[in-house]
Image: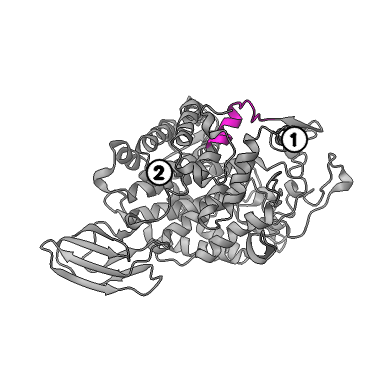
Protein backbone atom coordinates (compact mmCIF):
# COMPACT_ATOMS: atom_id res chain seq x y z
CA UNK A 1 0.00 0.00 0.00
CA UNK A 2 2.76 2.42 0.95
CA UNK A 3 6.07 3.07 -0.73
CA UNK A 4 7.99 2.80 2.56
CA UNK A 5 7.43 -0.65 4.01
CA UNK A 6 8.85 0.34 7.41
CA UNK A 7 5.76 2.47 8.09
CA UNK A 8 3.40 -0.17 6.81
CA UNK A 9 3.54 -2.05 10.12
CA UNK A 10 1.26 -1.75 13.12
CA UNK A 11 2.11 1.04 15.56
CA UNK A 12 1.55 1.66 19.26
CA UNK A 13 0.89 5.40 18.88
CA UNK A 14 0.63 7.84 15.99
CA UNK A 15 3.04 10.02 17.95
CA UNK A 16 5.75 7.59 16.86
CA UNK A 17 5.13 8.63 13.26
CA UNK A 18 5.94 12.28 13.90
CA UNK A 19 9.59 11.38 14.47
CA UNK A 20 9.80 8.87 11.59
CA UNK A 21 11.45 10.45 8.52
CA UNK A 22 10.04 7.72 6.27
CA UNK A 23 6.53 8.68 7.30
CA UNK A 24 7.17 12.31 6.41
CA UNK A 25 8.66 11.21 3.11
CA UNK A 26 5.47 9.29 2.40
CA UNK A 27 3.50 12.52 2.87
CA UNK A 28 5.87 14.29 0.48
CA UNK A 29 5.51 11.50 -2.09
CA UNK A 30 1.72 11.55 -1.89
CA UNK A 31 1.66 15.32 -2.37
CA UNK A 32 4.04 15.12 -5.32
CA UNK A 33 1.73 12.61 -6.99
CA UNK A 34 -1.52 14.42 -6.18
CA UNK A 35 -0.39 18.01 -6.70
CA UNK A 36 -1.28 17.97 -10.45
CA UNK A 37 -4.86 17.07 -9.49
CA UNK A 38 -5.15 20.16 -7.28
CA UNK A 39 -3.57 22.28 -10.01
CA UNK A 40 -6.23 21.04 -12.44
CA UNK A 41 -8.98 21.88 -9.96
CA UNK A 42 -7.76 25.45 -9.60
CA UNK A 43 -7.08 25.92 -13.29
CA UNK A 44 -10.76 25.17 -13.88
CA UNK A 45 -12.16 26.98 -10.85
CA UNK A 46 -13.76 29.62 -13.09
CA UNK A 47 -15.86 26.89 -14.73
CA UNK A 48 -16.49 24.73 -11.68
CA UNK A 49 -16.59 26.76 -8.43
CA UNK A 50 -16.77 23.58 -6.34
CA UNK A 51 -13.12 23.09 -7.26
CA UNK A 52 -12.32 25.78 -4.68
CA UNK A 53 -14.38 23.87 -2.12
CA UNK A 54 -12.60 20.61 -2.90
CA UNK A 55 -9.18 22.24 -2.71
CA UNK A 56 -9.87 23.17 0.89
CA UNK A 57 -11.12 19.69 1.74
CA UNK A 58 -8.18 17.94 0.11
CA UNK A 59 -5.31 20.14 1.31
CA UNK A 60 -6.23 22.03 4.50
CA UNK A 61 -4.74 19.43 6.85
CA UNK A 62 -1.66 19.27 4.65
CA UNK A 63 -1.22 23.04 4.88
CA UNK A 64 -1.50 22.95 8.68
CA UNK A 65 1.04 20.12 8.70
CA UNK A 66 3.44 22.14 6.51
CA UNK A 67 3.39 25.12 8.88
CA UNK A 68 3.45 22.94 12.02
CA UNK A 69 6.58 21.16 10.81
CA UNK A 70 8.16 24.35 9.36
CA UNK A 71 8.50 22.61 6.01
CA UNK A 72 9.35 25.70 3.95
CA UNK A 73 9.56 23.83 0.66
CA UNK A 74 6.10 22.32 1.12
CA UNK A 75 4.66 25.63 2.31
CA UNK A 76 5.93 27.42 -0.80
CA UNK A 77 4.68 24.62 -3.03
CA UNK A 78 1.19 24.87 -1.57
CA UNK A 79 1.17 28.68 -1.79
CA UNK A 80 2.19 28.59 -5.44
CA UNK A 81 -0.52 26.02 -6.12
CA UNK A 82 -3.23 28.08 -4.40
CA UNK A 83 -2.11 31.14 -6.36
CA UNK A 84 -3.25 29.50 -9.61
CA UNK A 85 -6.77 30.52 -8.56
CA UNK A 86 -5.90 34.23 -8.85
CA UNK A 87 -5.80 34.12 -12.63
CA UNK A 88 -9.28 32.58 -12.67
CA UNK A 89 -10.95 35.52 -10.94
CA UNK A 90 -13.07 38.01 -12.85
CA UNK A 91 -13.05 41.77 -12.39
CA UNK A 92 -16.66 42.80 -12.68
CA UNK A 93 -19.44 45.01 -11.32
CA UNK A 94 -22.21 42.83 -12.75
CA UNK A 95 -23.45 40.29 -10.31
CA UNK A 96 -26.31 37.85 -9.89
CA UNK A 97 -27.80 37.64 -6.39
CA UNK A 98 -29.94 34.80 -5.10
CA UNK A 99 -33.45 35.03 -3.66
CA UNK A 100 -34.84 38.53 -4.01
CA UNK A 101 -38.00 39.83 -2.41
CA UNK A 102 -39.91 39.29 -5.63
CA UNK A 103 -39.53 35.56 -5.06
CA UNK A 104 -37.47 35.00 -8.21
CA UNK A 105 -34.59 32.58 -7.79
CA UNK A 106 -31.95 35.03 -8.99
CA UNK A 107 -31.78 38.66 -9.93
CA UNK A 108 -29.09 40.75 -11.57
CA UNK A 109 -27.64 43.80 -9.86
CA UNK A 110 -24.92 46.35 -10.64
CA UNK A 111 -22.39 46.87 -7.84
CA UNK A 112 -20.89 50.18 -6.71
CA UNK A 113 -17.56 49.31 -8.34
CA UNK A 114 -15.73 46.43 -9.94
CA UNK A 115 -14.51 43.63 -7.67
CA UNK A 116 -12.37 40.58 -8.22
CA UNK A 117 -14.31 37.40 -7.53
CA UNK A 118 -14.66 33.80 -8.61
CA UNK A 119 -17.78 33.77 -10.78
CA UNK A 120 -19.03 31.89 -13.81
CA UNK A 121 -20.29 33.34 -17.08
CA UNK A 122 -18.85 36.82 -17.52
CA UNK A 123 -16.77 36.44 -20.67
CA UNK A 124 -17.68 36.72 -24.34
CA UNK A 125 -20.95 38.59 -23.78
CA UNK A 126 -22.27 35.88 -21.51
CA UNK A 127 -24.68 36.85 -18.70
CA UNK A 128 -23.18 38.26 -15.48
CA UNK A 129 -21.62 35.72 -13.20
CA UNK A 130 -23.00 33.90 -10.20
CA UNK A 131 -20.72 33.70 -7.18
CA UNK A 132 -20.72 30.44 -5.25
CA UNK A 133 -20.27 31.90 -1.77
CA UNK A 134 -20.00 28.60 0.06
CA UNK A 135 -17.18 27.58 -2.29
CA UNK A 136 -15.37 30.93 -2.19
CA UNK A 137 -15.72 31.35 1.57
CA UNK A 138 -14.42 27.85 2.24
CA UNK A 139 -11.38 28.45 0.01
CA UNK A 140 -10.69 31.87 1.53
CA UNK A 141 -10.74 30.39 5.03
CA UNK A 142 -7.87 28.19 3.86
CA UNK A 143 -6.09 31.18 2.30
CA UNK A 144 -6.60 33.36 5.38
CA UNK A 145 -5.06 30.71 7.62
CA UNK A 146 -2.01 30.57 5.34
CA UNK A 147 -1.70 34.37 5.61
CA UNK A 148 -2.00 34.13 9.40
CA UNK A 149 0.73 31.52 9.64
CA UNK A 150 3.02 33.56 7.38
CA UNK A 151 2.52 36.58 9.66
CA UNK A 152 3.93 34.52 12.54
CA UNK A 153 7.15 33.72 10.70
CA UNK A 154 10.06 36.04 11.42
CA UNK A 155 10.27 38.59 8.57
CA UNK A 156 13.82 37.62 7.62
CA UNK A 157 12.77 33.95 7.40
CA UNK A 158 9.89 34.55 4.98
CA UNK A 159 10.43 33.46 1.42
CA UNK A 160 9.66 35.51 -1.65
CA UNK A 161 6.78 33.15 -2.35
CA UNK A 162 5.26 33.86 1.06
CA UNK A 163 5.53 37.61 0.58
CA UNK A 164 4.09 37.50 -2.96
CA UNK A 165 1.26 35.23 -1.82
CA UNK A 166 0.32 37.59 1.00
CA UNK A 167 0.46 40.69 -1.20
CA UNK A 168 -1.74 39.01 -3.80
CA UNK A 169 -4.41 37.64 -1.48
CA UNK A 170 -4.79 40.42 1.10
CA UNK A 171 -6.83 42.64 -1.30
CA UNK A 172 -8.95 39.59 -2.16
CA UNK A 173 -9.67 38.83 1.49
CA UNK A 174 -10.44 42.46 2.22
CA UNK A 175 -12.83 42.99 -0.69
CA UNK A 176 -14.69 39.73 -0.13
CA UNK A 177 -15.21 40.34 3.58
CA UNK A 178 -16.23 43.91 2.81
CA UNK A 179 -18.92 42.67 0.37
CA UNK A 180 -20.08 39.75 2.47
CA UNK A 181 -19.83 41.08 6.02
CA UNK A 182 -20.05 44.88 5.88
CA UNK A 183 -22.04 45.27 2.65
CA UNK A 184 -21.78 47.57 -0.35
CA UNK A 185 -23.97 50.01 -2.23
CA UNK A 186 -26.13 48.41 -4.92
CA UNK A 187 -28.18 50.65 -7.20
CA UNK A 188 -28.45 53.40 -4.59
CA UNK A 189 -29.11 51.10 -1.63
CA UNK A 190 -26.33 51.02 0.98
CA UNK A 191 -25.05 48.11 3.09
CA UNK A 192 -26.37 45.44 0.74
CA UNK A 193 -25.19 41.85 1.17
CA UNK A 194 -25.80 38.70 -0.87
CA UNK A 195 -27.45 36.55 1.81
CA UNK A 196 -31.02 35.43 2.31
CA UNK A 197 -33.26 32.45 3.02
CA UNK A 198 -36.15 32.97 0.60
CA UNK A 199 -34.98 29.97 -1.41
CA UNK A 200 -35.55 27.84 1.68
CA UNK A 201 -39.03 29.25 2.07
CA UNK A 202 -38.19 30.74 5.46
CA UNK A 203 -40.92 32.89 6.96
CA UNK A 204 -41.25 34.88 10.15
CA UNK A 205 -44.80 35.51 11.34
CA UNK A 206 -46.06 34.27 7.96
CA UNK A 207 -43.87 36.63 5.89
CA UNK A 208 -40.85 35.71 3.82
CA UNK A 209 -37.68 36.92 5.50
CA UNK A 210 -35.48 39.55 3.92
CA UNK A 211 -32.81 38.96 1.34
CA UNK A 212 -29.85 41.21 0.52
CA UNK A 213 -28.53 40.69 4.04
CA UNK A 214 -24.94 41.23 5.12
CA UNK A 215 -23.27 38.75 7.44
CA UNK A 216 -23.53 41.36 10.18
CA UNK A 217 -27.30 41.40 9.74
CA UNK A 218 -27.57 37.62 9.47
CA UNK A 219 -25.54 37.01 12.62
CA UNK A 220 -27.68 39.42 14.62
CA UNK A 221 -30.89 37.85 13.32
CA UNK A 222 -29.58 34.37 14.09
CA UNK A 223 -28.81 35.42 17.67
CA UNK A 224 -32.55 35.86 18.25
CA UNK A 225 -33.72 33.08 15.89
CA UNK A 226 -35.39 35.74 13.77
CA UNK A 227 -34.68 34.38 10.28
CA UNK A 228 -37.79 32.22 10.29
CA UNK A 229 -40.16 30.26 12.48
CA UNK A 230 -41.52 27.68 10.04
CA UNK A 231 -38.47 25.40 9.63
CA UNK A 232 -35.66 24.56 12.06
CA UNK A 233 -32.96 25.13 9.45
CA UNK A 234 -34.00 28.74 8.86
CA UNK A 235 -32.05 29.69 11.98
CA UNK A 236 -29.19 27.25 11.47
CA UNK A 237 -25.63 28.54 11.42
CA UNK A 238 -24.55 27.45 7.95
CA UNK A 239 -21.22 26.35 6.49
CA UNK A 240 -20.65 29.73 4.91
CA UNK A 241 -21.20 31.55 8.21
CA UNK A 242 -18.57 29.37 9.87
CA UNK A 243 -16.04 29.80 7.06
CA UNK A 244 -16.52 33.57 6.90
CA UNK A 245 -16.17 33.90 10.67
CA UNK A 246 -12.98 31.84 10.57
CA UNK A 247 -11.57 33.77 7.63
CA UNK A 248 -12.25 37.18 9.16
CA UNK A 249 -10.65 36.02 12.43
CA UNK A 250 -7.49 34.87 10.63
CA UNK A 251 -7.31 38.04 8.54
CA UNK A 252 -7.67 40.43 11.47
CA UNK A 253 -5.27 38.45 13.66
CA UNK A 254 -2.61 38.50 10.93
CA UNK A 255 -2.87 42.28 10.71
CA UNK A 256 -2.48 42.53 14.49
CA UNK A 257 0.59 40.28 14.51
CA UNK A 258 2.38 42.05 11.64
CA UNK A 259 0.71 45.19 10.32
CA UNK A 260 3.56 45.81 7.87
CA UNK A 261 2.95 42.50 6.12
CA UNK A 262 -0.85 42.60 6.46
CA UNK A 263 -2.14 46.14 6.33
CA UNK A 264 -4.94 46.81 8.77
CA UNK A 265 -8.30 46.78 7.02
CA UNK A 266 -10.25 50.02 6.66
CA UNK A 267 -13.12 48.02 8.16
CA UNK A 268 -11.10 46.52 11.05
CA UNK A 269 -13.32 47.93 13.81
CA UNK A 270 -16.53 46.84 12.07
CA UNK A 271 -15.14 43.39 11.33
CA UNK A 272 -13.95 42.96 14.90
CA UNK A 273 -17.42 43.87 16.20
CA UNK A 274 -18.82 41.30 13.77
CA UNK A 275 -16.47 38.69 15.26
CA UNK A 276 -17.56 39.61 18.76
CA UNK A 277 -21.21 39.08 17.80
CA UNK A 278 -20.31 35.88 15.96
CA UNK A 279 -18.53 34.53 19.04
CA UNK A 280 -21.63 35.23 21.11
CA UNK A 281 -23.77 33.42 18.54
CA UNK A 282 -21.50 30.36 18.39
CA UNK A 283 -21.25 30.17 22.18
CA UNK A 284 -25.05 30.29 22.47
CA UNK A 285 -25.38 27.33 20.09
CA UNK A 286 -23.20 24.97 22.14
CA UNK A 287 -25.06 22.35 24.19
CA UNK A 288 -23.44 20.23 26.91
CA UNK A 289 -23.74 16.47 26.57
CA UNK A 290 -23.11 13.79 29.21
CA UNK A 291 -20.74 11.10 27.99
CA UNK A 292 -18.65 8.21 29.32
CA UNK A 293 -14.92 8.03 28.68
CA UNK A 294 -13.00 4.85 27.89
CA UNK A 295 -12.98 3.93 31.61
CA UNK A 296 -16.76 4.52 31.82
CA UNK A 297 -16.20 7.64 33.87
CA UNK A 298 -18.56 10.59 33.28
CA UNK A 299 -17.23 13.37 31.06
CA UNK A 300 -18.85 16.29 29.28
CA UNK A 301 -18.92 17.00 25.57
CA UNK A 302 -20.30 19.82 23.46
CA UNK A 303 -22.65 19.66 20.51
CA UNK A 304 -23.01 22.55 18.10
CA UNK A 305 -26.42 23.73 16.88
CA UNK A 306 -28.36 20.66 17.99
CA UNK A 307 -31.60 20.20 16.08
CA UNK A 308 -30.96 23.07 13.70
CA UNK A 309 -31.15 20.77 10.68
CA UNK A 310 -33.91 18.44 11.91
CA UNK A 311 -36.39 19.76 9.33
CA UNK A 312 -33.92 19.59 6.46
CA UNK A 313 -34.51 16.82 3.92
CA UNK A 314 -30.96 15.46 4.26
CA UNK A 315 -31.92 14.43 7.81
CA UNK A 316 -35.28 12.83 7.04
CA UNK A 317 -33.98 9.35 7.88
CA UNK A 318 -31.52 10.24 10.65
CA UNK A 319 -33.53 8.10 13.05
CA UNK A 320 -33.60 5.03 10.81
CA UNK A 321 -30.66 2.71 11.57
CA UNK A 322 -31.67 -0.30 9.48
CA UNK A 323 -29.21 -2.05 7.16
CA UNK A 324 -31.58 -2.12 4.18
CA UNK A 325 -32.24 0.89 2.01
CA UNK A 326 -35.00 2.98 3.64
CA UNK A 327 -38.56 3.29 2.41
CA UNK A 328 -40.97 6.17 2.89
CA UNK A 329 -42.33 4.55 6.06
CA UNK A 330 -38.85 4.61 7.60
CA UNK A 331 -38.71 8.39 7.81
CA UNK A 332 -37.66 9.35 11.30
CA UNK A 333 -35.66 12.34 12.55
CA UNK A 334 -34.51 12.76 16.16
CA UNK A 335 -35.59 16.14 17.46
CA UNK A 336 -32.10 17.23 18.45
CA UNK A 337 -29.92 15.54 15.88
CA UNK A 338 -26.41 16.96 15.51
CA UNK A 339 -24.45 17.90 12.43
CA UNK A 340 -23.39 15.04 10.16
CA UNK A 341 -19.72 14.24 10.77
CA UNK A 342 -18.72 15.06 7.20
CA UNK A 343 -19.81 18.68 7.52
CA UNK A 344 -18.70 18.76 11.17
CA UNK A 345 -15.09 18.63 10.01
CA UNK A 346 -15.54 22.42 9.75
CA UNK A 347 -15.60 22.60 13.54
CA UNK A 348 -11.95 21.54 13.75
CA UNK A 349 -10.66 24.31 11.50
CA UNK A 350 -13.12 27.05 12.46
CA UNK A 351 -13.05 26.71 16.24
CA UNK A 352 -9.27 26.25 16.26
CA UNK A 353 -8.85 29.48 14.28
CA UNK A 354 -10.98 31.34 16.82
CA UNK A 355 -9.10 29.68 19.67
CA UNK A 356 -5.65 30.58 18.33
CA UNK A 357 -6.63 34.17 17.55
CA UNK A 358 -8.72 35.04 20.58
CA UNK A 359 -6.03 36.66 22.70
CA UNK A 360 -4.51 38.59 19.81
CA UNK A 361 -7.96 40.01 19.07
CA UNK A 362 -8.98 40.49 22.69
CA UNK A 363 -11.61 37.75 22.94
CA UNK A 364 -12.13 34.98 25.48
CA UNK A 365 -14.03 32.51 23.28
CA UNK A 366 -13.45 29.66 22.72
CA UNK A 367 -11.46 28.77 25.83
CA UNK A 368 -9.58 25.56 26.69
CA UNK A 369 -12.70 24.00 28.18
CA UNK A 370 -14.71 24.51 24.97
CA UNK A 371 -11.99 22.99 22.80
CA UNK A 372 -11.60 19.99 25.09
CA UNK A 373 -15.33 19.33 25.19
CA UNK A 374 -15.68 19.64 21.41
CA UNK A 375 -12.95 17.01 21.13
CA UNK A 376 -14.66 14.91 23.83
CA UNK A 377 -17.82 14.85 21.74
CA UNK A 378 -15.92 13.25 18.89
CA UNK A 379 -13.83 10.89 21.02
CA UNK A 380 -16.54 9.65 23.40
CA UNK A 381 -19.78 10.55 21.60
CA UNK A 382 -19.15 9.59 17.97
CA UNK A 383 -16.53 6.81 18.16
CA UNK A 384 -17.91 3.29 18.80
CA UNK A 385 -15.10 2.59 21.33
CA UNK A 386 -14.01 -0.52 19.45
CA UNK A 387 -10.28 -0.21 18.76
CA UNK A 388 -10.20 -3.36 16.63
CA UNK A 389 -13.15 -2.45 14.42
CA UNK A 390 -13.39 1.33 14.72
CA UNK A 391 -16.53 3.01 13.41
CA UNK A 392 -18.16 6.40 13.84
CA UNK A 393 -21.77 7.53 14.06
CA UNK A 394 -23.10 9.55 11.14
CA UNK A 395 -24.06 12.46 13.40
CA UNK A 396 -22.12 14.37 16.05
CA UNK A 397 -24.71 13.79 18.78
CA UNK A 398 -24.18 10.04 18.38
CA UNK A 399 -27.24 9.39 16.20
CA UNK A 400 -26.41 6.85 13.54
CA UNK A 401 -29.28 6.88 11.09
CA UNK A 402 -29.19 7.26 7.32
CA UNK A 403 -28.09 10.53 5.76
CA UNK A 404 -29.08 12.29 2.53
CA UNK A 405 -31.46 9.63 1.29
CA UNK A 406 -32.47 10.48 -2.28
CA UNK A 407 -30.19 13.52 -2.28
CA UNK A 408 -30.68 15.85 -5.26
CA UNK A 409 -33.14 13.40 -6.83
CA UNK A 410 -30.57 10.61 -7.18
CA UNK A 411 -32.18 7.19 -7.41
CA UNK A 412 -31.48 4.93 -4.44
CA UNK A 413 -28.86 7.29 -3.04
CA UNK A 414 -27.92 7.64 0.62
CA UNK A 415 -25.34 7.15 3.35
CA UNK A 416 -25.99 4.11 5.52
CA UNK A 417 -25.22 4.00 9.27
CA UNK A 418 -21.48 4.38 9.96
CA UNK A 419 -20.78 5.03 6.28
CA UNK A 420 -19.41 8.56 6.69
CA UNK A 421 -16.53 7.06 8.67
CA UNK A 422 -14.17 8.05 5.84
CA UNK A 423 -14.64 11.69 6.91
CA UNK A 424 -12.77 10.96 10.13
CA UNK A 425 -9.70 10.00 8.12
CA UNK A 426 -9.84 12.93 5.70
CA UNK A 427 -11.47 15.57 7.92
CA UNK A 428 -8.58 16.62 10.16
CA UNK A 429 -9.99 15.02 13.32
CA UNK A 430 -6.45 14.00 14.24
CA UNK A 431 -5.77 17.61 15.22
CA UNK A 432 -8.07 17.10 18.21
CA UNK A 433 -5.12 15.36 19.93
CA UNK A 434 -3.98 18.81 21.00
CA UNK A 435 -7.13 19.21 23.11
CA UNK A 436 -7.98 15.61 24.01
CA UNK A 437 -4.93 13.30 24.20
CA UNK A 438 -7.04 10.14 23.94
CA UNK A 439 -7.70 11.10 20.32
CA UNK A 440 -4.33 9.42 19.82
CA UNK A 441 -5.88 6.04 20.68
CA UNK A 442 -8.49 6.48 17.96
CA UNK A 443 -6.03 7.68 15.33
CA UNK A 444 -3.67 4.81 16.16
CA UNK A 445 -6.56 2.38 15.81
CA UNK A 446 -7.50 3.87 12.44
CA UNK A 447 -3.92 3.73 11.18
CA UNK A 448 -3.56 0.10 12.21
CA UNK A 449 -6.96 -0.81 10.78
CA UNK A 450 -6.35 0.49 7.26
CA UNK A 451 -2.85 -1.05 7.24
CA UNK A 452 -3.83 -4.42 8.70
CA UNK A 453 -2.92 -7.66 6.93
CA UNK A 454 -5.46 -9.72 8.86
CA UNK A 455 -8.17 -11.06 6.50
CA UNK A 456 -11.04 -10.26 8.86
CA UNK A 457 -9.95 -6.64 9.24
CA UNK A 458 -9.23 -6.28 5.50
CA UNK A 459 -12.82 -7.37 4.83
CA UNK A 460 -14.06 -4.97 7.50
CA UNK A 461 -12.21 -2.09 5.80
CA UNK A 462 -13.68 -3.03 2.42
CA UNK A 463 -17.17 -3.11 3.86
CA UNK A 464 -17.10 -0.02 6.09
CA UNK A 465 -14.37 2.25 4.72
CA UNK A 466 -14.36 1.63 1.00
CA UNK A 467 -18.13 1.83 0.43
CA UNK A 468 -19.00 5.46 1.07
CA UNK A 469 -22.57 5.78 -0.25
CA UNK A 470 -25.40 3.91 -1.94
CA UNK A 471 -26.61 4.47 -5.50
CA UNK A 472 -29.47 2.67 -7.23
CA UNK A 473 -30.21 0.99 -3.89
CA UNK A 474 -26.75 -0.62 -3.68
CA UNK A 475 -23.55 0.36 -1.87
CA UNK A 476 -20.91 1.78 -4.23
CA UNK A 477 -17.28 0.72 -3.93
CA UNK A 478 -15.49 4.09 -3.93
CA UNK A 479 -12.06 3.55 -2.33
CA UNK A 480 -9.38 0.91 -2.09
CA UNK A 481 -6.96 0.88 0.83
CA UNK A 482 -5.17 -2.25 -0.38
CA UNK A 483 -4.29 -0.70 -3.74
CA UNK A 484 -5.10 2.99 -3.32
CA UNK A 485 -6.72 4.90 -6.17
CA UNK A 486 -6.45 8.69 -6.35
CA UNK A 487 -9.46 9.24 -4.14
CA UNK A 488 -8.00 6.97 -1.48
CA UNK A 489 -4.60 8.66 -1.74
CA UNK A 490 -6.18 12.03 -1.04
CA UNK A 491 -7.75 10.50 2.09
CA UNK A 492 -4.37 9.11 3.16
CA UNK A 493 -2.65 12.44 2.49
CA UNK A 494 -5.02 14.38 4.73
CA UNK A 495 -5.07 11.64 7.39
CA UNK A 496 -1.29 11.44 7.58
CA UNK A 497 -1.01 15.22 7.67
CA UNK A 498 -3.44 15.44 10.61
CA UNK A 499 -1.48 12.92 12.69
CA UNK A 500 2.04 13.67 11.46
CA UNK A 501 2.75 16.96 13.18
CA UNK A 502 1.33 16.49 16.66
CA UNK A 503 4.66 16.38 18.49
CA UNK A 504 6.11 19.10 16.32
CA UNK A 505 3.17 21.44 16.79
CA UNK A 506 3.60 21.66 20.57
CA UNK A 507 4.00 25.21 21.78
CA UNK A 508 7.44 26.48 22.77
CA UNK A 509 9.05 29.81 23.50
CA UNK A 510 9.23 30.64 19.81
CA UNK A 511 5.42 30.73 19.90
CA UNK A 512 5.39 33.72 22.25
CA UNK A 513 3.86 36.54 20.21
CA UNK A 514 4.57 40.24 20.57
CA UNK A 515 2.24 42.57 18.70
CA UNK A 516 1.40 44.85 17.01
CA UNK A 517 4.35 44.84 14.61
CA UNK A 518 5.83 47.39 14.56
CA UNK A 519 5.00 48.13 18.19
CA UNK A 520 3.19 51.32 19.20
CA UNK A 521 4.84 53.73 21.60
CA UNK A 522 2.01 53.42 24.11
CA UNK A 523 1.07 49.73 24.01
CA UNK A 524 2.76 46.36 23.61
CA UNK A 525 0.89 43.03 23.85
CA UNK A 526 2.67 39.80 24.72
CA UNK A 527 0.69 36.59 24.09
CA UNK A 528 1.89 33.47 25.91
CA UNK A 529 0.80 30.01 24.62
CA UNK A 530 -1.39 28.01 27.02
CA UNK A 531 1.12 25.15 27.36
CA UNK A 532 3.97 27.41 28.44
CA UNK A 533 4.65 28.47 32.00
CA UNK A 534 6.36 31.85 31.62
CA UNK A 535 7.18 33.23 35.06
CA UNK A 536 8.84 36.53 34.21
CA UNK A 537 8.84 39.16 31.44
CA UNK A 538 11.66 41.68 31.02
CA UNK A 539 12.23 44.40 28.43
CA UNK A 540 15.65 45.83 27.63
CA UNK A 541 16.67 48.70 25.38
CA UNK A 542 19.34 48.35 22.69
CA UNK A 543 22.07 49.23 25.22
CA UNK A 544 21.00 46.44 27.57
CA UNK A 545 19.31 48.67 30.13
CA UNK A 546 16.38 47.02 31.92
CA UNK A 547 13.24 49.02 31.07
CA UNK A 548 10.54 46.73 32.46
CA UNK A 549 10.36 43.72 34.76
CA UNK A 550 7.25 41.77 35.75
CA UNK A 551 6.69 38.48 37.57
CA UNK A 552 3.68 36.73 36.06
CA UNK A 553 0.96 34.95 37.94
CA UNK A 554 0.36 31.29 36.95
CA UNK A 555 -1.57 30.86 33.69
CA UNK A 556 -1.28 34.55 32.81
CA UNK A 557 -1.63 34.44 29.02
CA UNK A 558 -1.83 38.04 27.81
CA UNK A 559 0.36 40.85 29.09
CA UNK A 560 -0.58 44.34 27.90
CA UNK A 561 2.05 46.97 28.63
CA UNK A 562 1.47 50.74 28.67
CA UNK A 563 5.04 52.02 28.69
CA UNK A 564 5.19 55.08 26.43
CA UNK A 565 8.51 53.92 25.01
CA UNK A 566 10.62 56.17 22.85
CA UNK A 567 11.12 55.15 19.25
CA UNK A 568 13.83 52.57 18.80
CA UNK A 569 14.77 48.91 19.19
CA UNK A 570 13.94 46.86 22.30
CA UNK A 571 14.17 43.22 23.36
CA UNK A 572 11.45 41.24 25.13
CA UNK A 573 12.85 38.54 27.41
CA UNK A 574 10.46 35.72 28.47
CA UNK A 575 11.73 33.38 31.20
CA UNK A 576 10.52 29.90 32.20
CA UNK A 577 11.97 27.48 34.78
CA UNK A 578 14.11 25.85 32.09
CA UNK A 579 15.02 28.45 29.51
CA UNK A 580 14.46 31.94 28.21
CA UNK A 581 13.50 33.59 24.97
CA UNK A 582 14.34 36.95 23.38
CA UNK A 583 12.37 38.76 20.68
CA UNK A 584 13.35 42.05 19.09
CA UNK A 585 10.67 44.72 18.75
CA UNK A 586 10.73 48.03 16.95
CA UNK A 587 8.78 50.93 18.42
CA UNK A 588 7.72 53.58 15.91
CA gap between label 1 and label 2 equals 36 Å
The disc label shown at residue 456, or none: 1
587 relative to 2 in the view: left or right = left
475 relative to 515 in the view: left or right = right
Image position of 531 with respect to 429: above or below: below
Badge nearest the viewer, 1 or 2:
1
Where disc 2 sits, the SS reads loop
Q: Nearer the viewer, residue 127 or 51?
A: 51
Magenta segment includes 519: no
Q: Position of residue 385 (x, y in %)?
A: 70, 52
Mark 2 lies on residue? 69
In the rendered image, which quarter is residue 462 located in? top right
Magenta segment includes 479: yes
**Res. 563 visible in picture:** no
Label 2 crowd (10 A; few <14 / some 14-19 / many >=20): some
Residue depicted at x 83% and y 39% = 325
Image position of 185 with respect to 220: above or below: above
Q: Nearer the viewer, residue 263 or 464?
A: 464
Among the two numbered marks 1 and 2 on one chain, the one whose residue lies closer to the N terminus? 2
The disc label shown at residue 256, or none: none
In the rendered image, which quarter is residue 271 located in? bottom left
User: Over which residues does the magenta segment extend?
Assistant: 478-493
Q: Position of residue 428 (x, y in %)?
A: 55, 45
Where disc 1 sits, the SS reads helix
Q: Position of residue 237 (x, y in %)?
A: 60, 56
In the rendered image, which quarter is residue 98 located in? top right
Residue depicted at x 64% and y 66% = 299
Amino acid sequence: MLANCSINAQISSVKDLASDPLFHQEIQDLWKELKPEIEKLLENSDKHPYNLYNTQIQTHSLMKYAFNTSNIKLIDDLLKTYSISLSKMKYTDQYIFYYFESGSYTSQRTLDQKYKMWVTGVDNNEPPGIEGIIQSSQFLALISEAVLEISKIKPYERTETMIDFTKSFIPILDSHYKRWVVGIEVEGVKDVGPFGSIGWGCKKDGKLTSSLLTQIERINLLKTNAIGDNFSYCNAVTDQELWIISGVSNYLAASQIDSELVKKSEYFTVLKKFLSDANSLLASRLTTSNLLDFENQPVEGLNFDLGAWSDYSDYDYAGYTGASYPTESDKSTPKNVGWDISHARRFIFVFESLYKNKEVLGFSFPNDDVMTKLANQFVYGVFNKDFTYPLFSNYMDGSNGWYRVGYAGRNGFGYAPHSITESVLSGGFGFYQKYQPQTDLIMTSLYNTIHSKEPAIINFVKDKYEHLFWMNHKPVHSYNFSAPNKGTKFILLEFYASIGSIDMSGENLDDVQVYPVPAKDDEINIKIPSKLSVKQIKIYDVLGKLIYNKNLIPKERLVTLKLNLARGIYFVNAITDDTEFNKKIIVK
